[in-house]
């Protein structure tokens, strides 16, 4: 079972690299540092939103995400 720090690292890597890959496919190697940073951070945000949207199914399927592990700490209110 992963802890919150490890899940945060995984979430950031998964989301950031996913959108970054899209950026490289569309722009190639001409991506600027600013575009690189934007794409990576935007990917993290999208992954967090996806984790919120998938909260109930992830909980049901016993998938560990930042959202599902926090539900036990009562920090996340989801109805």
Image (cartoon, rainbow, N blue to C red):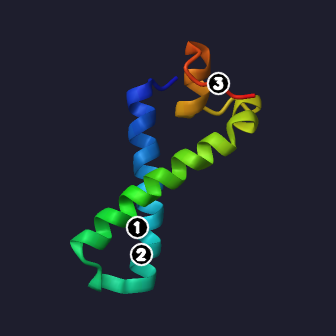
Q: Residue at x 69, y 42 (%)?
A: 54
Going by the image, does 44 lie left or right of 79?
A: left
How far, Cα to Cα, is label 1 from label 3?
Answer: 31 Å
Residue 5 image point, x, y percent: 38, 29
> Element type at marker 2?
helix
Between circles 3 and 2, the one closer to the viewer is 3
> Element type at marker 3?
loop
How far, Cα to Cα, is label 2 from label 1?
Answer: 5 Å
Q: Is residue 8 above or below residue 38?
A: above
Residue indicated by mark 2: 23
Q: Earlier in the sequence, mark 1 or mark 3?
A: 1
Between circles 1 and 3, the one closer to the viewer is 3
Residue 60 image point, x, y percent: 77, 30
Going by the image, does 76 lie left or right of 37?
A: right
> 60 or 72, which lies in front?
72
Q: Residue at x 34, y 64 (%)?
A: 38
> 49 or 4, which lies in front?
49
Q: Which numbered marker is on residue 48?
A: none
Q: Are marks 2 and 1 in contact (CB under 8 Å)?
A: yes
Q: Is residue 9 above or below residue 44?
A: above
How far, Cα to Cα, is label 3 from label 2?
Answer: 34 Å
Q: Residue at x 61, y 49 (%)?
A: 50
Residue indicated by mark 1: 20
Residue indicated by mark 3: 77
> Element type at marker 1?
helix
Going by the image, does 78 lie left or right of 30?
A: right
Q: Identify the image quadrant of the C terminus.
A: top right
Q: Residue at x 38, y 40 (%)?
A: 9
Q: Is residue 25 above or below residue 56?
A: below
């Amino acid at each position: 079972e992963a802890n919150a720090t490890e899940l945060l690292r995984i979430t950031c890597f998964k989301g950031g690299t996913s959108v970054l890959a899209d950026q490289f496919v569309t722009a190639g190697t001409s991506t600027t540092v600013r575009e690189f940073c934007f794409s990576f951070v935007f990917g993290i945000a999208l992954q967090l939103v996806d984790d919120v949207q998938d909260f109930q199914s992830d909980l049901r399927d016993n998938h560990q995400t930042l959202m599902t592990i926090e539900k036990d700490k009562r920090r996340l209110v989801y109805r």
